[in-house]
Amino acid sequence: MESHAEDIDFAVAAEEERKLRHDVMAHVHTFAHCCPTAAPIIHLGATSCYVGDNTDLIALRDGFNILLPKLARVIDRLANFAEEYADLPTLDIRLLANLKEIEEPFKEQIGSSAMPYKRNPMRAERCCSLARHLIALMADPLQTASVQWLERTLDDSANRRISLPESFLTADIVLSTLQNITEGLVVYPKVIERDIHNELPFMATENIIMAIVKAGGNRQECHEKICVLSQESAAVVKQEGGDNDLLARIQRDPYFAPILGQLDALLDPKTFIGRAPQQVQHVQSDHR
C-alpha cells in the first residue's frame, strides 16, 4: 500500500464513482486495483467521514497557509500607511477617493467608456463586491450546522463541496487585490489641504465659542452670533458659489475682539485630530 500511495488512476476513480455514487468507496476500489493483496483491509475500521473530514482538514490547513501570509502582508502595508499619515488631518476617514484626496494604483486602465477622465477605484470596488459574496457564504455552514442530525446526515456534503472552495478562492483574490491596493495607495495632501481650508472655519466654531467663554463672554450669546454669521457665510458658499468668508465676518465683528489674537491657533487643523497619532503609535507598538 505504501509503495502505491501516489499511484492514483483518477480516470478509474471517476468511473467507479459514476457507478457507486460514493467518492470514498470509488477510491477504495481504485486503490484495490493497484494493491489487490491489501484490498480486504483498505477501508477496515474506517468510515467515510474519517477519510473526508481529515482530508478537509489538510486542505483547510494548506488553504490557510496561502491566505494568512497574504493577510499579514495587507495588515503590514496598512500599518505602514497609517504610520506615515498618522497626523495628517482629513475631513473624513471614508469616501476619500470620491473627494479626490486618495487614489488606488492607476496606470493605463480605463475608468469609463463614456467619460475618459474617470479614474474609478476599480480594485477596491472588486474587493467590496467579492467581500459581499464571501460574507454571504457564511450562511451555508451556519444553516447546515443548525439542521444536520447528530448521526451526520449527508445534507452537508454537496454544500461543503461548493462553499468551502468558493470561500477560499474568494478570500484569496480579495487579499491579493487588497495587497496590490495597499502597496500603491496615492495620497494628495494639497487636495486635502484645500478641502480642509474650505470647511475649517465652520469646524472651528466650537473652539471659538470656548475661547470667548474663557475670555469672559456668554456662551449662549456667542453661540447665537456665530450661528447667524455661519448661516450668512453658508449662503455665500451655497447660493453664490463664493468662498467661505466666516472667518472674515468674525474678524469684523467687535464682539470677537478679545480673541482675535487666538484665531490662528484656534484654526490649526492639527488641533482637531485628537489623539489619532498616539493611537496609531499605540496600536503599532502593540501589534507589530
Image (tube, helix red, strand yellow):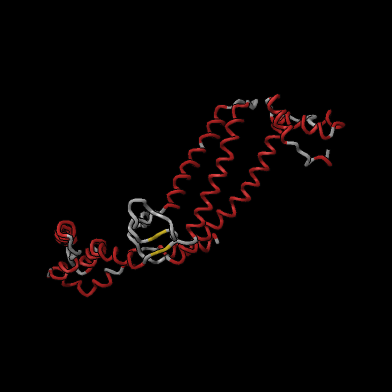
Residue found at x 61% / y 48%: 64
Query: Percent position (x, y) of residue 221?
Result: 15, 60
> Quadrant location of the N terminus?
top right
Query: Percent position (x, y) of residue 192?
Result: 33, 64
Apparent side of residue 221 relative to residue 35 in the rendered image (left or right): left
The residue furthest right is 37
In front here: 92 or 204?
A: 92
Apparent side of residue 23 relative to residue 1 in the rendered image (left or right): left
Residue found at x 51% / y 61%: 77
Apparent side of residue 96 relative to residue 154 in the rendered image (left or right): left
Apparent side of residue 46 relative to residue 254 in the rendered image (left or right): right
Residue found at x 37% / y 65%: 188
Query: Percent position (x, y) of residue 202?
Result: 23, 61
Where residue 28 sits, quadrant-wise, is top right
Where residue 3 sits, quadrant-wise, is top right
The residue furthest bottom is 261
In front here: 20 or 140?
A: 20
In the image, residue 188 above or below residue 167:
below
> Quadrant location of the C terminus?
bottom right
Q: How many marks?
A: 0
Residue found at x 57% / y 44%: 168
Query: Percent position (x, y) of residue 286?
Result: 53, 61
